[in-house]
Amino acid sequence: EIERLDTLESKETFESLKNDAENKMVLANIMLAEATEAKRKAQLEIAEEQERVKVADDERKNAQKDEEELQKLVKAQAAEERKRYEAIENKLAAEAEEKRKAHAEALERIAMLEADQKRLDQEHKAALAEAQKQAKIAADEE
C-alpha cells in the first residue's frame, strides 16, 4: 500500500510537474507570440518611417529641381530682356546717329546756301553797279 501511495504520489507529482511545464510552455508561446507581434509592428513602423523619409527626400529633391528650373527660367528671361533692351538701345543709338548725320548735312547745306546767297548778292550788286555805270555812260553820251 505504501508503494501504491508512493506511485500515486509520484503520479500526482508528475502530473503537477507536467501541468506546470505545459503552463510554462503556454506562457512561453504567448510571450513568443507577443514578442513576434511587437517585432512585426516595429518592422512595420520602421518601414513606414523609411517611406516617410523617402517621400520627404523625394519632395526635397523635386523642390530643389523645381528651384533650379525656376532659376534657369529666370536667367533665360533676364537674358532675353537684356537682349531686347540692347536691341532697343542699339536701334535708338543708330537713329540718333542718323539724326546727327542728317543735322550735320543740313547745317552744311545751309552754310553752302548762305555762301551761294552771299555770292549771288555780291554778283547782283556788281551787276547792278555795272548796269548803273552803263546807264550813266549811255546818259552821258546822249
Image: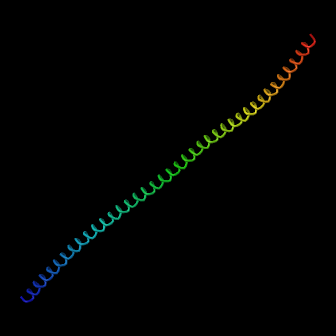
Q: Looking at the picture, how far across and down is residue 85, in whole percent? A: 59, 43
Task: Kindly identify the residue that appears in the image at 45 percent across and 57 percent down.
Answer: 61
In front of the other: 45 or 9: 45
Task: Kindly identify the residue that appears in the image at 54 percent across and 46 percent down.
Answer: 77
Q: Quadrant of residue 116?
A: top right
Colour scheme of the picture? rainbow
Task: Kindly identify the residue that appears in the image at 24 percent across and 72 percent down.
Answer: 31
Which residue is situated farthest in the bottom direction here? 2
Q: Quadrant of the C terminus?
A: top right
Q: Looking at the picture, how far across and down is residue 78, in whole percent? A: 55, 47
Horizontal placement of 50 versus 9: left or right? right
Q: Looking at the picture, how far across and down is residue 108, in whole percent? A: 76, 33
Q: Quadrant of residue 80?
A: top right
The image shows residue 14, relative to residue 38, as above or below, that is: below
Horizontal placement of 19 versus 117: left or right? left
The image shows residue 126, relative to residue 87, as above or below, that is: above
Which residue is situated farthest in the right direction here? 141
Q: Quadrant of residue 8?
A: bottom left
Q: Looking at the picture, how far across and down is residue 14, in whole percent? A: 15, 82
Horizontal placement of 65 versus 119: left or right? left
In front of the other: 129 or 141: 141
Horizontal placement of 136 versus 71: left or right? right
Q: Quadrant of the N terminus?
A: bottom left
Task: Kindly identify the residue that appears in the image at 68 percent across and 35 percent down.
Answer: 99
In front of the other: 120 or 132: 132
